[in-house]
Image (spheres, grey):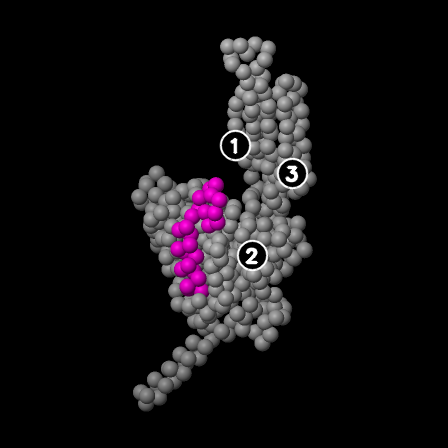
Amino acid sequence: MKFLLALVICLVCLGIASAQPKVPTESALDRFLRYVKIDTQSQEDQTTVPSTRKQLNLANLLAKELMVLGAQNVRVSEFGIVYAMVPGNLADNSKVPVIGFIAHMDTSPAVSGENVNPIIHKNYQGGDIVLPNDKTQVITVEKNPVLKKLIGDDIITADGTTLLGSDDKAGCAEIMTMIDTLHQNPQIKHGDIAIAFTPDEEVGGGIEKFDVKAFGAKFAYTVDGEELGEISDETWSARTATVTFQGKSTHPGTAKGIMINAMYAIGDYLNRFPHDILPETTEGRVGFVHPYAGVIDVESSSLKILLRDFDVSGLDAKEKLLRDMVAQTAAKYPEVKIAIDVKENYKNMKEVLKNFPELTNNAMEASRRAGVEPFLKPIRGGTDGSNLTFRGLPTPNLFTGGGNFHGKLEFNSRRGLEKTTETLINLVQIFAAKS
Ligand SMILES: [Zn+2]
């Protein structure tokens, strides 16, 4: 009798086991906690990619783990980019577009990523979060209203002395946990999935070395956004202006009638910037002009200015404004030679992505199926995806669950990591089902 009962219970267990997906060998949270402890800070103004050798420590680790999880053609390129292919399990994988997922391994040069000590604030019950090793570092509800949605969740922060590195090790952990889950659950049907982990996203050099063809995807997603549900298929269109002011230097003791001091002209030019279209006075869909670096000298002064807008017409208007300001300053300082040169940096990826609405729609559906209400948010910046989109690989950006990137107040949560992973798993199934 006991034996029979045991047998019945066992069969019931098996029944349940075959219906319920198996859990991954390591949770998204545990993976995340491991990855953030590896220092992968990138560095500005380096001539090599990756800009710092230490990024390879994570690259090599991810490559090893990808192999263990059954990924194929795993390799680390000479530039430290990790590529892999997760083979599909459909009768005919060629009928489904190869979908790529990309996360970046480096962390911002703005704040140290050495000796990151992740703190888990279990079962968060509301209120400001004081970081233990520097009590002046406080994540306030006032500045982070998203905290109200995290009641009962386990929030992960750094200890107040470093950044956390959720940007973008959350994306790395979520993609890896998706692969792990798919590996454990062959009953989840999907086509071929291309994977890449990139260095130097924060310093803008890594993506130039990205081999779109070798990656092998038709469409891709960067997993590098913030709040749960946030999906971005729009970025800035971006230009940079350089304005030069040429004067004439001479010994000040004998300068009368000879010296032309370019510094007054550059001062006049700076004073003409309208206050309502600066980074510090704009948000949402409103673009800006931003003088961000300059050289000031009697003989030769110069100014570098960022122009940002979601619409090309808005960008054109900002360029015209800067040129008009040049004319006005030149009229006031006729002896100073002033020249302006404007270069295009990147374009709003929406110009391409509007032709592939299914990318955004499928992502929104995947998010909804995970119980997360999706919303579209234009990115006030560029992404690796905007670069790839214009190189023939349409690539919108997905949330990671994190917030407060590039600073000591950075955070993510257990639910953020789990729901993002679930969304990725839903997404590959949606593409398989719709093809
Ligand atoms: Zn990022």
Give the residue drawn at x 50%, y 66%.
73
Q: CA distance from mark 3 to mark 1?
A: 20 Å
Span of residues in magenta: 42-66
Front disc: 2 or 1: 2
What label sits on residue 211 in the rendered view?
2
x, y percent for residue 402: 45, 51
Q: Is residue 359 magenta?
A: no
- Check whether the beta carbons of the residues at disc 3 and disc 2 lie within 8 A of each other: no
Crowd class of label 3 (few under 14; some 14 to 19; many from 20; radius 10 Å):
many
The amino acid beneath tag 2 is Asp
Please identify the quadrant where the C terminus is shown: bottom right
Residue with the mark numbered 3: 315
The answer to which quarter of the image holds residue 62 is bottom left
Amino acid type, callout 1? Ala
Q: Measuring from the top left, give residue 118's x and y in whole percent.
A: 35, 51
Residue 239, given in percent of the width and then of the height, sits at 61, 39
Q: Secondary structure at mark 1?
A: strand
- Residue 293: numbered disc: 1
Q: Is residue 60 magenta?
A: yes
Q: Residue at x 45, y 53 (%)?
A: 105
Which one is in front, 13 or 410? 410
